[in-house]
Amino acid sequence: AAKVPEAARAVGTSWLHMASCIPPACVLQYGAVVLPRILEAKLISVGQTPHALPPAGPCTIEVTGQEGSPTNLTRALSGLVAINDAACQQHLAISFQENSCALKHCFFQFFARRHRFENTFGAQVRSTPIDLDADINPEVRDTPAYVDAAVKHYRSCKAIGANYFGAAFHTVDFVGYELGVCAPTGCPKEGIEWWTISIMSKWYPGVGVATGSFQVTELAHISEANLQWVIAGVSRSGSTSLAAWLNSHPEVQVLVDPKNICLEGGLDYLFRRSYMEHLLPRRALGPPKKRPRPGRPKLLRGIKDGTLSQLARGRRVLAELSQVRVLLIVKDWIEWLKSSSGNRSRHVSLAEHFGNHSRDGSFDFQKANLAENLREAQRLGLQLERVKVLHLETLRAEGFKMLNRVANWLGARSLNHSDARALGMSLSFPSRNGWHSTSWQASWWQELC
């Protein structure tokens, strides 16, 4: 029962007694959607014109009682006919498609669970450039703390059945913000903007958000990506050749940027240029996971990105990717040093590599120190049973047999030689990015010796 003074003119009492037989599927929506609609419908019936939602329709039945006597509801309930579940569910589904309905529902949820939504507001979710890594720039060693705060808010938000957004805006003084906002499911942009401005006004009185500057992006955790495996390094050790070989298997797919000759750039480098590393725009996740049709194999999607093992930031990402298997390829360190001595456009000497006592000359062997990098990733949460380390010489020696072993480990089926030839697959490990000429390699070995 609810006391609505405006109703007294029409029904002689300010008490409106309403009884509802609520289908199980509608229980969660009742307080947020149905009851407010009943009250608004009553106000409309007595000539009031509030900013109203559609009436509750088949989800409710009204019971008339005496003023100040809500106990009559008990007797009335026994005579109600059960509400049709399907009609109620359809009514709610249609109503939620209306923006005004969704906005009112959003406001109600914010008010009803204000403390939970406020406690998950305000984490920094500003995108960070790739070079902001503790291995490269010691000034950003505090970045993981901001990342952890955003992920903590994200998980708390999902635990209450809500969605997490990045809200970007600037103030009238042109101070920019990119903050995490937890909002009810289905909440439109207007509701998230209203909530952000109200909390900012509470925390920072006098701060005004510039009109038209507000942008909202729904965020997701990288573990939600439709991704089953990654080649995480070591760069210049045959990782591109491994990616190309795996991509020739009919049940394995490498996600790449078509313009990238190193077979990288999958999902737009989401692991490098993402919202605080672990959170990224939900639209960047790629297509949702689908069950394969009967008789058709599941396509295993993966990416190649050497920074995932070589940089501190990448190792934190590996620890968060709980759904993927991790491939790493290594080769003899001197061979790796030679491969790292330049690229297609420029070859450098060892003197340049090691700096020759110059101010900025250095060579970071840590990038290829796989044992230590894996220990660090394990400390951060990477499960080593999800990791397989391959040696380039083993791949070359065992050829197609090794391809089948790796494909099996990823979850794909084995192929026989006839199937492989029919598909145009190479039975030996391919060689890609042969950037160094014979004469350059000869001079390099001479300098090394």
Image (spheres, rainbow, N blue to C red):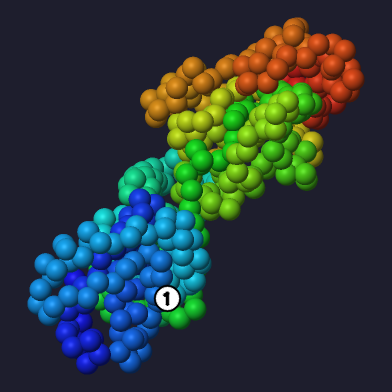
Which quadrant: the C terminus?
top right
Residue 395, can we see it? no
Measured as percent of width and height from the top left, residue 173 is found at 40, 79
Residue position marked by numbered label 1 in the rendering: 54
Q: Nearer the viewer, residue 277 or 292?
A: 292
93 left or right of 443? left
Residue at screen point 14% across, 68% down:
72
Which quadrant: the N terminus?
bottom left
Residue 431, can we see it? yes
- Residue at the front extreme, as displayed: 79
Residue 391, picture quadrant? top right
The vertical placement of 122 against 57, above or below, is: above
213 left or right of 420? left
Q: Nearer the viewer, residue 183 or 205?
A: 183
Measured as percent of width and height from the top left, residue 260 is found at 75, 42
Residue at screen point 51% across, 41% down:
224
What amino acid is labelled 1 in the image?
Answer: Pro
